[in-house]
Image: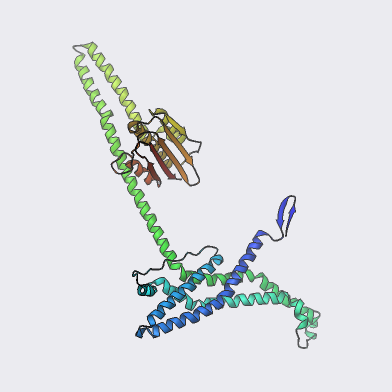
Amino acid sequence: MTTTYAGVPATSTPAPARRLLRQLGIDTQYVLLGFPLGLITLVLCVTGFATGVGTAIVWIGLPLLAGSLAMSRGFAHVERVRIGPVLRRKIPHPHYRSARSTSWVGKMFAPLADGQSWLDLVHGVFRFIPSTISFSFVLVWWAVAVAGLTTPFYDWAIPHPPENVELPELLGLGDATITRLVLNVAIGLFFAITLFPVVRGAALLEAQFARGLLSGVDELRQQVATANAARDVAQEQKAAAVSAEATALRKLERDIHDGPQQRLVRLAMDLGRAEQQFSTDPEAARATVAEAISQTRETLDELRALSRGIAPPILVDRGLQAALTALAGRCTVPVDLDTPVIGRLDAAVESTAYFVVAEALTNVAKHSNASEVQVSVERNAVGLLVTVSDDGVGGASLAKGHGLAGLDDRVRAAGGVLAVDSPEGQGTRLTAALPL
């Protein structure tokens, strides 16, 4: 029944109480039904196993043993479904070894070589122990709680021996019948108050025993596989970081060699020529010095450009949005920039996102023949999505030997993923997903 107070709906039973009552019902039916199931599986599994082992010498026992394992697997499937609501999570079905042979004989004997099938059989045989313990506690607690609380409704119909009226009066308890009713109700109330923890503990005892045998080994195997996968990912990220660093150093060395180094060599030659001209032709010497000064300014500009490629000051000082705005302003191809205010991010994430856009715009300017570039940065709950698309000639690739291979290493080193969609003649779309 639902009522409203001041426009706010209210229920007669609070939500926590409903959850407790629901869990109490789930645990109770699990334990009460588990006891007869335990009896059935005990008889069938022990009979099948004993018969199969006893007649294995004449070969007929092997099919019986395989059938017992298949039967125990069926009971195990049922139990995994039953313990899910008790443990409040879905219990995954483990991996069973499939038959390597395609013949019916190979399929029939496949359970004999499967470890999980034997664990299912062990559970079918020994589940009777926790089932009996849990069933005893649950049945006693429910019976005493119900019987004690309802004593006033049926006590009159139960014959009682002659009462010793002197003892209650001596103890100051008054009438013996009332005393008996009060004591029974008090005992029933105690068992009712402690009913949920007792039933919950009994259900967990039986459910955890089943989980350990029916899915524990498979869960451990999955955890090991997950740990191995995480280790492989970490190793790949380490290798990608080393590769990206080596690529960046080679690029920096090439840029310095082709740019500032050549200008400095020419600057040294010009200054040497000017030194010789001062004594014979001062005007030519001044012209040579003026040209050397111009070469110095151009060298400084190139060094500033290289320093921006290593650690852009604007990125460090003002963040990713300002750095990308400055980057788009320097691009020779018109850039449509969509960078909403996303706040400051981790320095490694900002640096990686900046270099993704910088490298992409450089490739667009050099190779794409594009007339426009769209750059967008989007932050969601799990990461940062950077997209750069153009309307150029396409044909870009992440394969080794191409210009984007080093960028892919940098993104993977940050734990992200880089994807390129670049069909010939249809432009290029580069997307980088970086975790936060």
Q: For the point 45% across and 42% down, which residue is it? A: 385
Quarter-wise, where is residue 283 in the image?
top left
Instruction: Point out residue 416 in the picture as x, y percentages from the top left corner.
Output: 40, 46
Instruction: Point out residue 126 in the picture as x, y percentages from the top left corner.
Output: 48, 78
Q: Which residue is at the front of the view, 279 or 417?
A: 417
Q: Which residue is at the front of the view, 354 or 189?
A: 354
Q: For the point 37% across and 58% down, which residue is it? A: 228
Indicate whether 160 appears above or below 258: below
Indicate whether 368 appears above or below 175: above
Indicate whether 321 appears above or below 156: above
Quarter-wise, where is residue 224 in the image?
bottom left
Q: Is residue 187 visible?
A: no
Coloring basis for residues: rainbow
Instruction: Point out residue 162 in the picture as x, y percentages from the top left corner.
Output: 78, 88
- Give the left or right position of residue 312, taking residue 44 as reference: left
Instruction: Point out residue 148 in the picture as x, y percentages from the top left corner.
Output: 71, 76
Q: For the point 29% across and 32% down, which residue is it? A: 255
Q: Quarter of the image for the N terminus: give it.
A: bottom right
Quarter-wise, where is residue 259 in the image?
top left
Q: Which residue is at the front of the view, 359 or 259?
A: 359
Q: For the point 37% across and 52% down, which residue is it? A: 233
